[in-house]
């Protein structure tokens, strides 16, 4: 049974075992003015699964990720990773931002972008050695971009840039991957390549949480779904939570009939 909105069913949206969850959010509220972007959100993301965060435009999906990471300061709420404060677990978390939020005119090579994923490990003063370069190239190979290591990042297509940022996240060898619209605006080949990498991470026991916009591919790509429209709507396995009733509750009149055709 899907875990429904607390106000509707009188309970929170979270499973009981918070200590095992790579990311648990309690009572999170963020405002960009008088109107909250997310309000009193509870969410518990299952370990070793791929979870899609789904909702209409302006529903607070990206804000939820940024607040969970501390990029945006919440008005209230608490975030834990594996039962501990976020600040103590940052080394286990990798984040891929929206491509539109990145300054692609910055003059840097593709290889250097991937090596940025190792800065927490290396520190500011240690030089990048052959071992780190080989690791970065191996991460580029995982996303099909090893032949572009010396290119300027701004010279790549949008899909290629997205692959490079995923390679940077892979270089961190994290346990939790948070991705904000990783498939937005990419070509079919890039989408297939990105999903293959994310599914491989899941097979390794890592956790993937991604803001996702294409309702038709949720059942094919993800194990679990978290539906939100400022407040939580439903959370759980795709087969249970990704229903027409829950989507209608999240999207209302903005949910096109064609979009609902692939809903389980």
Image (cartoon, rainbow, N blue to C red):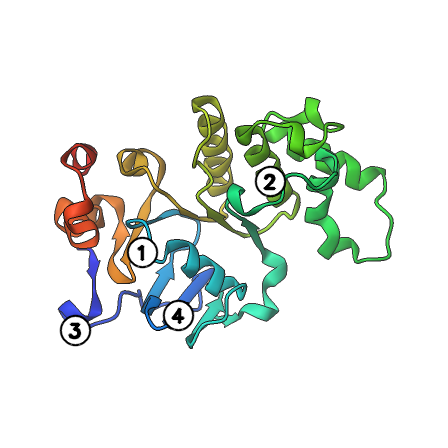
Q: Which residue, as the protein is rendered here, is positioned at the far bottom?
A: 76
Q: Residue at x 76, y 28 (%)?
A: 150
Quadrant for the N terminus, please: bottom left
Marking on residue 165: 2
x and y percentages locating residue 242 in the rendered image = 22, 46
Kindly report which numbered mark, 1 or 3, lies closer to the viewer in this rendering: 1
Marks 1 and 4, the one that precedes in the sequence:
4
Q: Residue at x 31, y 56 (%)?
A: 59
Marking on residue 10: 3
> Contact (CB < 8 A) between labels 1 and 4?
no
Marks 4 and 2, the one that precedes in the sequence:
4
**Cα distance in 3D space between marks 4 and 2:** 28 Å
Marks 1 and 3, the one that precedes in the sequence:
3
Kindly report which numbered mark, 1 or 2, lies closer to the viewer in this rendering: 1
* Label 3 Cα neighbours within 10 Å, binned few <14 / some 14-19 / many ≥20: few
* Label 1 Cα neighbours within 10 Å, binned few <14 / some 14-19 / many ≥20: many
Kindly report which numbered mark, 3 or 4, lies closer to the viewer in this rendering: 4
* Label 4 Cα neighbours within 10 Å, binned few <14 / some 14-19 / many ≥20: some
Quarter of the image where one finds residue 171: top right
Q: On the image, numbered disc 1 is attached to which residue?
A: 59
Per the image, label 3 sits on a secondary structure element best described as loop
């Amino acid at each position: 049974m899907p875990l429904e909105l607390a106000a509707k069913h009188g309970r929170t949206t979270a499973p009981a075992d918070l200590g095992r969850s790579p990311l648990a959010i309690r009572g999170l509220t963020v405002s960009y003015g008088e109107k909250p972007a997310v309000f009193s959100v509870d969410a518990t993301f299952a370990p070793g699964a791929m979870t899609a965060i789904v909702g209409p435009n302006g529903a607070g999906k990206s804000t939820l990720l940024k607040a969970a990471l501390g990029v945006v300061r919440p008005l209230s709420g608490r975030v834990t990773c594996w039962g501990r404060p976020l600040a103590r677990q940052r080394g286990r978390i990798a984040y891929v931002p929206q491509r539109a939020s990145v300054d692609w005119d910055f003059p840097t090579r593709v290889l250097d972008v991937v090596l940025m994923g190792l800065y927490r490990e290396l520190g500011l003063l240690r030089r990048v050695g052959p071992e780190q370069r080989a690791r970065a190239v191996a991460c580029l190979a995982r996303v099909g971009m090893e032949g572009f290591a010396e290119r300027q990042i701004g010279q790549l297509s949008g899909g290629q840039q997205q692959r490079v940022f995923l390679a940077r996240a892979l270089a961190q060898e994290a346990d939790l991957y948070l991705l904000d619209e990783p498939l937005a605006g990419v070509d079919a080949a890039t989408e297939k390549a990105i999903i293959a990498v994310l599914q491989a991470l899941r097979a390794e026991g890592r956790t993937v949480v991604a803001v996702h916009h294409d309702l038709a591919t949720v059942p094919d790509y993800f194990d679990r779904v978290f539906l939100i429209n400022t407040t939580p709507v439903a959370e759980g396995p795709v087969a249970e939570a990704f229903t027409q009733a829950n989507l209608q509750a999240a999207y209302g009149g903005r949910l096109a009939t064609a979009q609902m055709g692939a809903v389980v």
